[in-house]
Image (cartoon, grey):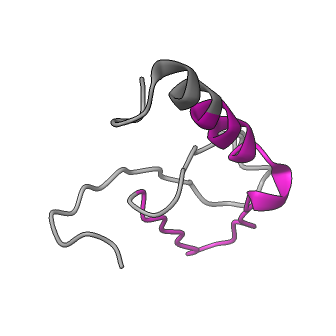
Amino acid sequence: KSIVGMDQEGSNKLLNLLFKHQERLDLTCRFRWSKNAVAIWDNRSVIHYAISDFYPNRGLGYKRIMDRVAIKGDRPF
């Protein structure tokens, strides 16, 4: 909602800049799925949005499973 220690106008400007920055396509990753492939993103370090655009599996003969896992641990370095 706002950045602690900043006035609302400055906070809004900076947040809007950051939000627009994260939408850049050159900062995205498209993973090419194959049989037995595994992809892991650490949401503490990245902004992850899973796009469920895998149906149907285009006759590849396997089922894709999407699970979310939460790991309790240290802050990312």
Left or right: 57 in relation to 41: right
Residue at screen point 80% across, 50% down:
58
**Would you place residue 60 above or below residue 22 in this image?**
below
Left or right: 27 in relation to 39: right
Q: Residue furthest right?
A: 26
Stretch in magenta = 14-43
**Would you place residue 16 above or below residue 42 in this image?**
above
Horizontal and vertical percent for residue 3?
41, 35
**Would you place residue 73 above or below residue 6 in this image?**
below
Residue at screen point 48% across, 20% down:
8
Q: Quadrant of residue 71?
A: bottom left
Horizontal and vertical percent for residue 68?
36, 50
- Of residue 50 and residue 9, the one placed in the foreground of this image is 9
Left or right: 38 in relation to 67: right
- Of residue 34 and residue 75, the one placed in the foreground of this image is 75
Q: Main secondary structure of the magenta part?
A: loop
Horizontal and vertical percent for residue 25?
83, 51
